[in-house]
Image: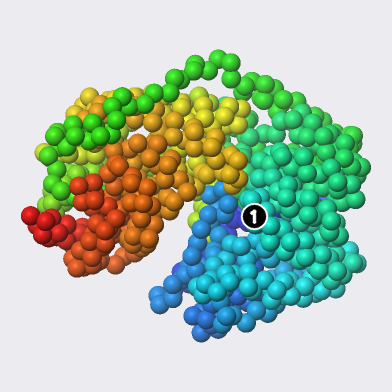
Amino acid sequence: MTKNSYIIGFPRIGEHRELKKALEQYWSGKISAEELHKAAAELRKRHWLLQKEKGVEYISSNDFSYYDGMLDTAAMLNAIPARFMKIEDDLQRYFAMARGTKDLTALEMTKWFNTNYHYIVPELNDEINFRLNAEKIIGEYCEAAKLGIKTKINLIGPITFCGLSKTSDNKGGTFKYFDTILSVYKELFAKIATLDDKITIQLEEPLFAKAVPPEYLQLLKRSVTELCEVSNKIELIVMTYFEHSCEATEILTETPVWGIGLDFIYGQKNLGAIKGIKSKRIIAGVVDGKNIWKTDFNKALSVLNEIDKFMPREKILVSTSCSLLHLPFSVINEPESKVKQLLSFASEKIDEVVLLSKLFNSAELSGDERGYMHKSEQITAARSTKEDLPEIKPEVRKKPFAERINLQKERQELPLMPTTTIGSFPQTAKLRKLRRDFRQGIISASDYEAEIKSYIDDCIAIQEEIGLDVLVHGEPERNDMVEYFGEMLNGFHFTSNGWVQSYGSRCVKPPIIYSDISRQEPMTVKWITYAQSKTSKPVKGMLTGPVTIINWSFARTDIPHSIIAMQIADALKEEISDLQESGIKIIQVDEAAFKEGYPLRKENVGEYEEWAVKSFRHTVSIAHPETQIHTHMCYSQFNDIIKTIEAMDADVITVETARSGNKLLRIFHDTAYKNEIGPGVYDIHSPRIPSVDEFKSQILLRLQVVDRSRMWVNPDCGLKTRKWDEVKPALINMIKATKAIRDSFM
Ligand code: GLN
Ligand code: ZN
């Protein structure tokens, strides 16, 4: 065992997504609850033993979850909304809360800070009978103990829990339950204290990585002090990650906590907050827990040496910057490639933490470890290409919107409140098989092309038949809006087995941006122009924007995002040029992930917005004034970012509003946003087919805040997850409603 090596948490989905498979088999009734429990226990065992063999001192229990850690915390607190109480079986109730049932809506799900992991949002209300359910936590601890592994116990802290939960009754928010919740935590601590003479608890309070109100800091002080008082057998670590948490750190130094966990990768400012904490352990997150590059040991060591100035070395534990949950399992499962040697996934990050803590404590390295370190140094040196990057001069469209829109209107001859869709049409099983067969070489390129074209034919015919005004080709050739472009651009790498949990059993395989990005050849022109050749109505070109591509990839860290974004923008710009030269009049640049890339701290927002806007504007800068640029974003909370949306200066923006009505849209009205808007009127997340009357009232409602001369009528988002027999009647009703309202204006 290497002293002072610390892993915040380990991915639970399994090296070969075993948990995903077991869960899905259980949900579909193919295996029993016992079999699921057995599969889960086997995975936990494997993950514990792996960490033990690699020499980690601090290994976690309760980092495992059948679905999500916030949901587990809700279950631990018995925070179960009344509608689920009729389900008696604990496990079935748990999954009902996560996924819903035929007659029960699931709890909401949302993004975990600035990662692509989604957590379940607990619902708190007065009907809840908070009480302790400690079986999972105690059970997993004992399971590890039987294997001879003494774990630290991971818990989401009460402030983060309350802060991320929601409540339907608006009297006092979720924090009115705080004291009750804290008392359940105390009970839990008391129970944990009976397990052993000394026991470490990792209390995760990532909420403090954001700037929080001063009351929360006071709550932190009070709650950890009271929790420490429960038993002197407990060594309490308060852990934050993803950003600095200087305010909380200062407060924590005044409490009896045993240790403080800090992110020094994404929160370098933490270095400024640790001066006064000599008496505590520092869990120093110096190995990047959410990106896939090998560690630069010199850099990590220099941070550790910085910390060393403030405290005795033996009090510094070497750690990942956050849980390894956000990384794929192991590089070992990747085929040989030039990129492979640059990579370090969860399993390799453990080796790096162990190696680093040996280095830092002047312990002897093995031959393998010396080799690993040497190699990673060479790679780090080789990847720094900063100097030879050609500078891309950011450009913007020449004419202002007021002039562009007139030229566009003259050319397009569209009716008032034009109808359109967001891009994709239903992705059938047949289509998915077609792409798979082509990928695996089972069918020829010409057969593949013929099939895709026939799907496009159908899409165009259907859109003409139902009377949409601006058509799309339907995106049959795309499995994913980022992967499609990544595979065609230079500079991207795709892993074979690099799965990361996104939510529940769902995993994603984010592309890796490893080098400079450029376009090899046109990426979409063939399909879009084919679609356009089949109709006299305009067909929208369909691209994914630079910000979304970066936010949904593992990006390189040797150059800033601003440069990567400009490289992508430059490549997309060429595509836009080709599209418009081939006669395409409208081009949509999707920025679905624009908002989710926002930094956690205000102080970093300006920089993000600057490169995000600059790269978007550069992408579309080549568009002629009469080429209409659309963008699309999958949400409608624009209050904080309306100025930025304005600065992007798309001619038309389509957003998601079917569920929120005008509440969120109002900001466009209040700020006198001038460009055109397509507020979603069809909720594509639901199989329901809205009636003509419903569509009418949706549209009329939107017209209260958007002037009809600037409004488009469209669904919330792409239709790829829906079925044709839902989409077709829904769009027919949408168009009937639009026409009726248009006629009423005559
Ligand atoms: N054009 C994409 C589609 O329709 C947009 C998807 C998205 O916004 N997530 O599928
Ligand atoms: Zn969308």
| Residue 605, quarter of the rendered image | top right
Image x and y of residue 176, in percent: 63, 73
Left or right: 719 as drawn, with respect to 210: left
Considering depth in this image, is 593 or 555 the residue closer to the camera? Answer: 593
Residue depicted at 51% across the width and 84% down the height: 86
Residue depicted at 56% across the width and 82% down the height: 127
Label 1 within 8 A of ligand 2 by Cβ: no
Under mark 1, the amino acid is Val
Q: Total number of numbered labels? A: 1
Q: Which residue is mark 1?
A: 212
Compared with residue 573, is residue 746 higher up or lower down, i.e. above or below?
below
Image x and y of residue 613, in percent: 44, 34
Q: Point out the image quarter for the C terminus.
A: bottom left
Packing grade of label 1 (10 A; few <14, some 14-19, many >=20) is some
Residue depicted at 39% across the width and 27% down the height: 618
Compared with residue 312, is residue 172 higher up or lower down, i.e. above or below?
below
The residue positioned farthest toward the left in the image shown:
746
Left or right: 114 as drawn, with respect to 627: right
| Residue 94, quarter of the rendered image | bottom right
Residue 35 seen in the current view: no
Image x and y of residue 462, in percent: 16, 51
Compared with residue 423, is residue 530 higher up or lower down, i.e. above or below?
above
Here the colouring is rainbow
Indicate the secondary structure of the residue bearing disc 1. loop
Considering depth in this image, is 485 or 177 the residue closer to the camera? Answer: 177
Residue 218 seen in the current view: yes
Residue depicted at 44% across the width and 20% down the height: 393
Image x and y of residue 382, in percent: 64, 20
